[in-house]
Amino acid sequence: MTRWLFMALIWIAGCSRAPEPMRSTGQDLSPSLMSAPALDVTRLAKTEDCADCHSDVASHWTNSAHAYASFDNPWYRASIDQFRDERGVNESRFCAGCHDPLLLMSGDIDREVLPENELAYAGITCLVCHSVESTRPDGNASFSLTDRTVLLPDPAIPEEIEAHRARLTMKPLRTAALCGSCHRSFSGPSIGNENHLPGIDDLGDWASSAFAGAVQNQLTSVDESSCQGCHMASVSASDAEMAGAFDGMVRSHRWAASHTAMAVQLPDPGQAKQATDQLEGAVIVDIGPVRAGRRRYLLPEESRLRGAERLVFDVLLENRGAGHRFPGGARDMQDVWVEVEVREASGKLLGLSRPNEEGKDDVFMLRATLLDAEARPEILHRVHRFSAPAFDRTLPAHDAQAVRYSMTLPRQIELPLQVEARLLHRKHSLEFQALACEASRTDRGIRFAQGAEQRGKVALDPCLEQPVTEVGAATVWMGRGAVAHKPTGGAARPVIERLLTQALALLHAKQEHVHVAKPSIERALRIARESKSAVLSARALVLRARLSSAQGRPNEAAAFTERAEALIGPSPVLDRVRGDAYARAWRWRPAAEAYQRVADSSPLDPRAWRDLARAYGSLSQDLNALSAADAGLRLAPTDESLLRSRALALESMGRPEAERAEQRWLAHRAPDAQPRLLAACEQEHQRCRRDRQPIPHYTLSPPRKAIHASIDPG
């Protein structure tokens, strides 16, 4: 008997017998939205059989966040244990659908989860993802599992190989919807929160990006890519990978993303490499424009400086590499910050923005802030304490942010100044790391670490120093002699690219100050004309149209889009800019016409339907508004704006389901307490006072002194 036939017989014996149900069919798993029939959970937990033929894929998975998604993940365990202690074990099904599907299906999540429980180390196994037969767009584990058996084929029988492949590669497997069923979440009354609150939404952010083929409000040049395209790239296969390789390549099952704190502790060096590769270069960092006294310069190297005057400059961050917000995932607990240094030509440090002993409250961070019932920023990801969103300073795909820094130069100064900016990433905030570290040193934490080792897994230690990854950086020189030095990083790009990034970021200024983007746009347009580049000219004209739109000049905005169209032809991007311009001026008929073309071009983008439903509703075209809202809700079922448009359209038409639609809208609208909580937070917490500014402003500190944040009137 050959080895292959022997393995096949073993698999047939193990997989073709009837499963032993550990839950009744139709068992309620709420507040998780997961759906599963009666399944043999012990069988779902097995991964050894898969490794016999798929050794590379199994090795990837063994070193992945999916393999460590459950209670052997000390960061997650600290979070869910606190949730369960404060809110209840039944409510923790909310977490379990995505992190602990086997504990959920077995019913073990409904009682104390002990270190002796085998399923607490299973995570998201091969047969969980490969048994998803359908998905829904809600999130919170909105997928359904099949109970169809799995058969290991005899390699000599093509029919068995094909049947095996068909069973394990069902339609959802290669779709973004599969990933989105867990990488979209929300909290609300089902777990004891007073209000519905949207959470992680990598799916929605991706669906509204050019990576998904959606229409932007600026011209971009990116190749479309799914979740799998970025996070499951093809890698070289070893000779041991018998079944999963094609042309010597296999899809990575590491899903490293940004979990560097975990990846660095796992034995596979490829895990840490993939994590850092995902991070490095995802955001472009640049510096400029500059204000010296009353003089303004678009590029730092053109500036002229004098001693004792005030120096102001912008650090620019542009998300070019991530197909969703950066950072993604749980945006309130990622640790991503900007460091800035200013030095004289001699190397003497004049000013800096860097975390000090007290932490990062005075350092710009890319993060979301949520408030608890007392208007305090909830910094430990205690989802059950969330009451209202405050701010989200993470970067949408294809968008840019300006961060302003200022200092007073010394009277005697050695030029040129060297200015360096870096964007740094650490997986968890130090506060959350301390929480997980403390929990890991308890008897329960020690027993789980021992349990992981006994099962051949790594006992992850949350107390270890986390890796810090440089996502992007730039160095420029300012003042006399600057042109003798070459800028680095994002500042080394062609001048026109730098100017376009400037304009994109400055368009987010307050409406009364948005004109600051105009000089960057006009200079970019001049350069594009000189280079005779139709595409670059069109990109500048689109930004100029957006500036006119922000200033309430729709006809002027339309004229700029027409000039862009003459260069590159019709584009739904131009329709989006037109639609936005008309909508801002309450000219709903031309807005609806433009938005309809946008929705026709990107029918899987919920934002397109949101804009269209609002425009039709404002025109009292209720049937069209209802149709657009329904199309959007099929993609984003809890979107407040879409629910509102649907409810108002049904009410206007006198439809009997209007009352129920209104109740659903009101259940998903922003909390009534949000303005009050936000105002209170701004009074008590510098974090809220600073983050409410479209362009936050920091005063660079002298060496070894505290960093102070300030409010920039511009």
Image (cartoon, helix red, strand yellow):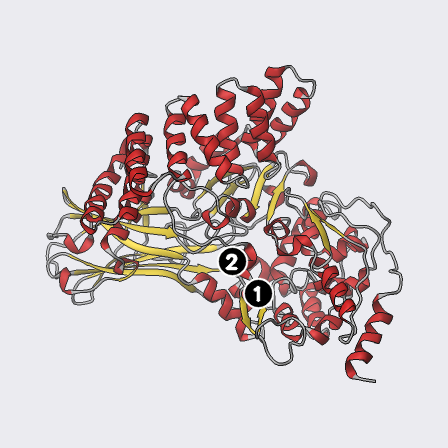
Which corner quadrant of the image does residue 440 belong to?
Answer: bottom right
- Residue occupying image coordinates x 15% and y 60%: 482
**Picture layout, residue 234 above or below residue 491:** below
Q: Disc 2 marks which residue?
A: 428
Label 1: which residue?
462
Residue depicted at 63% across the width and 57% down the height: 76
Q: Residue furthest bottom?
A: 1
- Judge from the rendering whether residue 135 lies leftward or rightward of residue 387; answer left or right: right
> Percent from the top left, x then y, of residue 655?
66, 17
Q: Residue type at mark 1: give it.
A: Pro
Residue 317 or residue 197, whichever sits in front = 317
Q: Secondary structure at mark 1?
A: loop
Rendering coords of residue 469 (x, y %): 43, 64
Depth check: 202 or 714 in front?
A: 202
Cβ–Cβ under 8 Å for marks 2 and 1: yes
User: What quarter of the picture does the C terminus occupy?
Assistant: top left
The alpha-carbon separation of the residues under discs 2 and 1 comes to: 10 Å
Horizontal side of residue 196 vs 281, given as left or right: right
- Residue 670 seen in the current view: no
Count of numbered labels shown in the rendering? 2
